[in-house]
Amino acid sequence: MSNNPYYPQTPPPMMAQTSTLAVISLISAIAGFVILWGIGPIIAVITGHMAKSEIRNSMGRLTGDGLATAGLILGYLQIGLLVIGCCIFAIMTAAGVTLPFCMIPWGNLQYY
């Protein structure tokens, strides 16, 4: 029956594969906390959005939407923490530079 042209065989079911971009997004987001402080979150966000688009357009052949979402969340979290840290650093630097000038008693200057 398998060689009969009147009964075509159905192709074997395809296994869904995990999106490589989703895995890269999650790995770079985790590496952003450990070794890739500046570039890791940016890579995670870019590849996370690319992975979500790729998964959406794959018609069920690709999985890994949760990995891409986790990479995006961690990437955006790191970018937010980086911005907050830079703002705190700028405020502390400005306060450290101007604070000595605020402590000078300008009214008690004596000219000799």
Image (cartoon, rainbow, N blue to C red):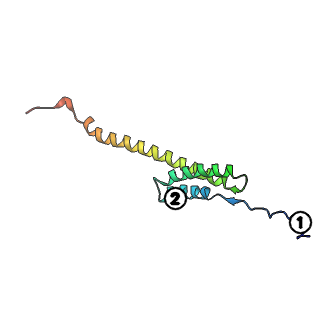
Which residue occupies the foreground of this view, 39 or 14?
A: 14
Q: As rendered, which of 10 and 16 lies closer to the eye? A: 10
Task: Give the position of the C terminus as an image quadrant.
Answer: top left
- Secondary structure under the numbered disc 2 in the rendered image: helix
Q: In this view, does 92 lie to the left or right of 35?
A: left
Percent x, y for residue 29?
54, 55
Outermost front residue? 5
Query: Tags 1 and 2 in contact by the CB under 8 Å rule?
Result: no
Q: Where is mark 2, residue-wise?
A: 31
Mark 1 vs mark 2, CA separation in Å: 55 Å
**Label at residue 5:** 1
Q: Nearer the viewer, residue 21 or 28?
A: 21
Q: Where is residue 84 in the image (x, y as percent from the top left)?
A: 46, 43
Q: Is residue 36 left or right of residue 24?
A: left
Pair 1/2: label in front? 1
User: Which badge, 1 or 2, is on the more N-terminal residue?
Assistant: 1
Name the secondary structure under disc 1: loop
* Horizontal and vertical percent position of residue 23: 60, 58
Disc 2 marks a residue whose amino acid type is Ala
The structure residue drawn at horizontal position 47% and vertical position 57%, both measured from the top left corner, is 36
Quadrant of residue 103 within the rendered picture = top left
- Residue at image position (63%, 55%) is 67
Residue drawn at the location 44% of the way across and 46% of the way down = 85
Tag 1: residue type?
A: Pro
Lateral position of residue 88 relative to residue 12, left or right: left
Query: In what quadrant of the picture does the N terminus appear?
Result: bottom right
Query: Is the residue marked by circle 2 packed among few (<14), some (14-19), or many (20+) residues within 10 Å?
Result: some
- The residue positioned 25% from the left and 37% from the top of the image is 101
